[in-house]
Image (cartoon, helix red, strand yellow):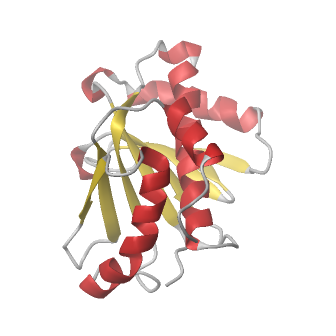
Amino acid sequence: MEFQHVNVKLFVKDAKKIDLEVLVPVFHGWIQNQGEGELLLDVADYRHVPSGPGVVLIGHQGNYSLDNSGGRLGVRYNRKAPLKGTNYDRLVQATQAALAASQRLEAEPTLAGTIQFNGCELEVFINDRLLAPNTEETRTEADSALRAFFTTLFGEGEYTVEYSQDPRTFFTVHVQSAKAFDTTSLLNNLKSLEPASH
């Protein structure tokens, strides 16, 4: 099985304190100050949609958003362009992008610290029902690769994994760490540790 279009969502603390309107000028600032290797194009405002995508920074390779799908607010990275390499490589790329975006929002002066990663849970889903239908077969086939990745990210035996069972939804896994991490620690884990397997 080949993962493409990997999405990673990092849940935030104190979501009720966050005014999504302030994200619009912040994301426009990201467009003006393009990062290396990315082409950021536009900002879409979906704040009016209940449990929707929130405010989305649209890019060529991927989108960033402060997303309220499922009724839970989080920083989401949505990889759109195909990516070469292994499934492990694609999981690392999407998670690094989500963590870096979260870290950047945490440090953004105009947000005054209102957006903070909760440090202990994330959601990964594959935005491609043809490549990864949400079935028991997909979950069985993907489990070892996902657990190898989560072990790199959180440490051996330090997390729980829960798969969505609804076949109408994307293939989704929710991961809860036994202890809290900050974005810097998780980024360092991905950079410094070798995967158990590819």
- Taking the image as shown, residue 85 lies to the left or right of residue 63, namely right
| Nearer-the-camera pick, 181 or 115 | 181
Residue 91: image x %, image y %? 54, 61
Q: Residue at x 39, y 50 (%)?
A: 53
Q: Residue at x 53, y 63 (%)?
A: 196
Residue 156: image x %, image y %? 38, 51
Q: Say above or below: 187 vs 112.
A: below
Q: Residue furthest right?
A: 36
Q: Is residue 54 shown to the viewer in this render? A: no
| Nearer-the-camera pick, 126 or 143 | 143
In which quadrant is the C terminus drawn?
Answer: bottom right
Residue 106: image x %, image y %? 51, 23
Q: Quadrant of residue 114?
A: top left
- Taking the image as shown, residue 184 lies to the left or right of residue 169, namely right
Q: Is residue 36 shown to the viewer in this render? A: yes
Q: Say above or below: 20 vs 48.
A: above
| Nearer-the-camera pick, 185 or 127 | 185
| Nearer-the-camera pick, 172 or 73 | 172
Q: Say above or below: 124 vs 47.
A: below
Q: Say above or below: 49 vs 113.
A: below
Q: Residue furthest left?
A: 165
Q: Residue at x 55, y 42 (%)?
A: 189
